[in-house]
Each structure stands twice: as C-alpha cells, then as structure tokens.
Image (tube, rainbow, N blue to C red):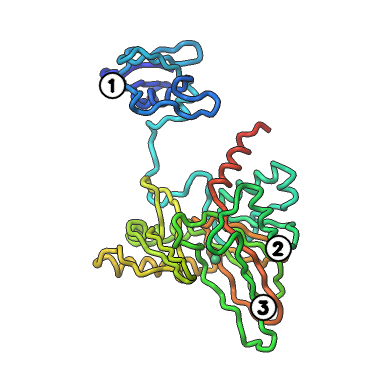
Amino acid sequence: MQIALSADRQELHLSHGNQVVRFHGVWLRDNAQDAATRDPRNGQRLITLADVPADCSMSSARQDGDTIKVTFAADGKVVSFCPDWLRAHAYDVSRDTTPGRLPEGTQAWDSALSDHMPSGDLTAMQGDKAALLRWLNAMRRYGFAKVTGLPTHEGNLFDIVDLFGYVRETNYGRLFEVRTEVNPVNLAYTGLGLQAHTDNPYRDPQPTVQVLACLENSAQGGENMVVDGFAAAQRLRDENPYGFNLLTAHTARFSYTGSDGVALHSRRPMIELSPDGVLQAVRFNARSAAPLVDVPFDDMPAYYAAYRRLSTIIDDPAMEVQFKLTPGEAFVVDNTRVLHARKGYSGAGTRWLQGCYADRDGLLSTLAALEGTPA
Ligand code: FE2
C-alpha cells in the first residue's frame, strides 16, 4: 500500500497496485476514531462540525505499524486510521445508479417462492438464536415469512413480535380482529376478496411490519397471498421506465377518516426511492387512495396509465405466493414492501385472524446484533 497526499493536501490517496482510493481531509477529520472524537464505550460522536477546522488540509500522512497516521495542518492534530477500516468505508468507488435498485440484503421474488416459502417455528426461534437469525434474515431478504407452532390462544401474535421488537399501537388498538362468520344459511354469500395492498399508507410513517396470526380458518377459501412490491415496481420500470419515473417523482395521497376522531392523511409517492435511486417503499392501497392532486396536469394521463399497469402487475398470479393459514400459523410482512391480500371465502365455517403492527427497524436491529455475535 502506498500513502500519499494530493498536491493541494486536501486528499489522502491510498494505492494498491494501480488502484487509488481517495479520502478528503474533512471526511477523515470528522470520522476520526480517537477517544476525543468518538466515545469508546458507545461509539457515539463527541464532536460537531464546529469542532472540525474549516481547513482540513493535511501536513503529513504516513504508515506507522498497522495504522496510517494523518496530521492536520490547522491544529497539528494527529489521527490514526486502520487501513481495513478505511477500505471498508471507502466512498471513492464506482456505483450502480440504476433507479429502482434493490436495497442491500434483499432479493426480488415471484410465485416461484411458493416452493421454498420462508418459515420459522416459534419455539425453535425462542430457544435457538441460529433459528431466529435464519428467520430474521428471510424477513430482510424477502420481506415476508411465515411462523408456525404458535399457541392457539388470543394474542399469540405478540409472541412473534417479542422475538424482535415491540408492538406499534394505533387507533385500531394493540391488535385488531379480522373475523368473519360465513353465513351457512345463505351459501350464495361470499366473503369479498381484497386486492393485494400495503396497510395503512395514510399513516406517516406507515406501519413497517404487519403480523397476521390465525386462530380459526374452517371456511372454504380465505387463502392469503403476498406479492413482492419491489418486484412489481421493477417489472413496471423494465416495461415502462417513464411511467415508473412518474410514480416515483410525484406524491400520491392517502386518507382514512372512517372512525370518529380520526383523520389520517399522508402525502407520499406510491413507489419511493432514496435520492440515489434505491427502492425504499411501495404504497399501494386502492381503498385508502385519496384524490391525486400533486401530479402535474399534463402528466396525469401517463401517471394513471402507469398506476393501472402497476395494479395489473400486482394482480398477475405469476407474482403471488398463496397459502392458507391453519390455527397456530401466522405470516409477517415488511409493510413497506410486500403487499398482502385475502382471497374470497364462502361456505360454512369461521375465519378468525388477529393482526398487529411492529417496527422494521427493530427487526433489522435484532438481526444485525445477532449477526455481530461471534458464533
Ligand atoms: Fe391489510
């Protein structure tokens, strides 16, 4: 490894063969790892930018054993960096800039996932960190996983949330009932199916994890199905980049005012990208879509065409994974990504599910902490 400063002394250059990785002085100073800059116990930064000199030019940079020592010209402060740490945090890299890229650690899926549906047994996950890690990793990868082996009493879904975080309570309560008794006298009656949707897009932030646990399911039909919203968004992008761009570039609106004292409104895009183009969230819910008023007049027809195409893609059976829960089973979705639906049901019997929301950041935090645990 060769260490050099740029001619203006504003950049550190590390060379391996003919590959050069550059770092700016201001970035190095802000990311110093010494005890005066970062608390050694919790890793939190102890300084603000006001403590960083406006001029972060460097007077020298040299190798000292296993570290690189950088001296800043303004105040003579010497900061040591581990070369591996610098390599791991390099930002002078070529990047994929394709809009609609998947977030790291995720994988798009379609109906083929039916053959290897991610699932975990509750008792196994409660007692075995490796089993929990596998399930959490599936949640991060696919945004969807089943849980089996639940006790069949009310509130069993909280046992799932306890694995990784906390319930997010809403105006629907700590949990909500999804209960229908099919009228056996009138077999013509059919429980309505619901189009695949994400829940509660009218909240901001929307609930990021949804758990649905089955207590009874003896009705005919009533299967659940899930669709990967990221896969649907990518399919739209590949077919119609212009339409995809419209759905990402303009905000939609969602509302719920169905209960006394509740008036929930949000203004967010149907397909949300980070500023660098990575898929962040899909919001799709015809029932709570409010009038679109943020789309420019001239773009509205093309926006609706893209919205309609996204809806058709979501309804395509090739995109969906379908399953019927039995009592003691549940499924969990990343509600920022995976849409869920219920097929119609009919005939004698009951269907009783309980649902609740939780937070995805807690789930990912539990996963990251487990991944960091030495085996
Ligand atoms: Fe729902």
At a point 57% along the width and 42% down the height, the residue shown is 365
Disc 1 marks a residue whose amino acid type is: Asp
Q: Which residue is denoted by mark 1 in the rendering? A: 55
Query: Viewed as shown, does residue 357 lie left or right of 184?
Result: left
At a point 68% along the width and 60% down the height, the residue shown is 155
Disc 3 marks a residue whose amino acid type is: Glu
Residue 44, image x, y percentages: 48, 29
**Residue 113, can we see it?**
no
How many residues crowd mark 1 within 10 Å: few (<14), some (14–19), many (20+)? few
Check mark 3 vs ligand 1: CB closer than 8 Å? yes or no: no
Query: Viewed as shown, does residue 45 lie left or right of 113?
Result: left
The secondary structure type at the circle numbered 1 is: loop
In the picture, the quarter occupied by the C terminus is: top right
Q: Which residue is denoted by mark 2 in the rendering? A: 154
At a point 70% along the width and 61% down the height, the residue shown is 329
How many residues crowd mark 2 within 10 Å: few (<14), some (14–19), many (20+)? few
In the picture, the quarter occupied by the N terminus is: top left
How many residues crowd mark 3 within 10 Å: few (<14), some (14–19), many (20+)? some
The secondary structure type at the circle numbered 2 is: loop
The secondary structure type at the circle numbered 3 is: strand
Q: Which callout, 1 or 2, points to the residue nearer the camera?
A: 2
* Spatial separation of the CA atoms under disc 3 and disc 1: 71 Å
Farthest-out residue, left: 298
The circle drawn on residue 181 is 3
